Image (spheres, rainbow, N blue to C red):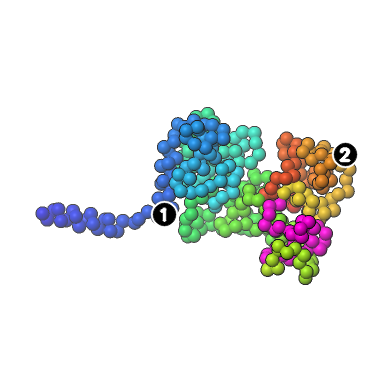
Amino acid sequence: MKKVVVVFIVSFFLLAFQVPDTKAQSTREKIVSIAKKYQGVNYKWGGVSPSTGFDCSGYTQYVFKEAGLKIPRTADDQFAQGKAVPLNKLQPGDLVFYKNTYPSNGITHVGIYIGNNDFISATSSYGIKVNPLDNVYWSKYYYAAKRIIEDDEQTINQIAPALPIGQFYDVPESYFAHNAIAELSKKGIISGYTGSVFKPGLTITRGQAAIMLNKELQLPATTELKFDDVSPSSAAAYHIAAIERAGIVTGYKDGSFRPNEPITRGQMAIILTKAYKLQNYEAQAFKQFKDVPTSFPTFTEIHALRAHDITQGYQDNTFRPSGKTTRAEFSAFLYRTIN
């Protein structure tokens, strides 16, 4: 009887003082468990379910959704989420991203870190498969890692201490806009987010573009704000008023500016050519973008950027003027323009 009582007391003591799992820890374990159970499922381009097969980002989105977390569909958009984390500080459940695994711009592959130097992903050759991070093939294309699962602030600071001004965890030196982002940040024209991340893939708004542009131009503003949808107390108000006064922007026909609306690549071309007077060139002397014919409304502005070597467009010789401009793209275009 005495032996039974002692065992009971010891067991109770251990249970009472056992450190409970945090929410983040339990979520991480859940993600790893879910991810592993789909090993062997076939790869399918555009696939988003185990019944039809997965592509890489369809797989990560499915696993996170089953764990109760919502992330975007594509690898590029998933990369724009969360907080950057150094490779040597990875925790199970973090996303790992790869670049140039096939001929394409931007992020081309994403997987889930599962611990012990391994990650799991949907591979085109073997389907859902576990590979070591230092695999001869994958290590060659590794780009960055992101943490989607929320941790407390103390943990975040331990994982990713603040970097010097101009440096960001998600903008490595090999990134196409690295120099532009670093230099504009040092000048106070742009800024990043908490945790020393820049989120280069996020879309930039018309209001944010106005702020960046006028921080570089330093134009004075009038006391009168002509756009009804721009609050005088907003961070962008002064800068919007300044570039409107200079004739760089005119807003829309209904009298609005739409500061929270994403700025398109075509609109970006207009404001840069007006701000820096880049129109003086002969368009016919330069190769024209196949999706911007001479009849296109912003033909002159877009090809002015090409003439001044500010952009060469995409590999298929398109400019995609209706496409949304990312923070990295605007930074690169502005930096090249002023230099």
Q: Amino acid at mark 1?
A: Lys
Q: How far apart are the two marked residues, 1 and 2, measured between alpha carbons?
A: 61 Å
**Magenta includes 248?**
yes
Residue 298: image tag? none
Is residue 314 in sight in this rendering? yes
29 lies above or below 49: below
| Quadrant of the rendered image containing residue 253 | bottom right
Residue at 72 percent of width and 36 percent of height: 315
| Quadrant of the rendered image containing residue 285 | top right
Q: Which residues are magenta?
A: 234-263
Report which residue position mark 1 lands on.
23
- Residue 140: image location, x then y, percent: 57, 37
Q: Which quadrant, please, contains the N terminus?
A: bottom left
Q: Earlier in the sequence, mark 1 or mark 2?
A: 1
224 lies above or below 190: below
Secondary structure of the residue carrying numbered label 2: helix
Is residue 136 in sight in this rendering? no
Q: Amino acid at mark 2?
A: Gln
Secondary structure of the residue carrying numbered label 1: helix
Q: Residues within 10 Å of mark 2 (few under 14, many from 20)?
A: few
- Residue 141: image location, x then y, percent: 58, 38
- Residue 110: image location, x then y, percent: 54, 40
Report which residue position mark 2 lands on.
284
- Residue 257: image location, x then y, percent: 73, 59
Q: Nearer the viewer, residue 186 or 269?
A: 269
48 lies above or below 162: above
In the picture, measured across the screen, residue 250 lies left or right of residue 54, that is right
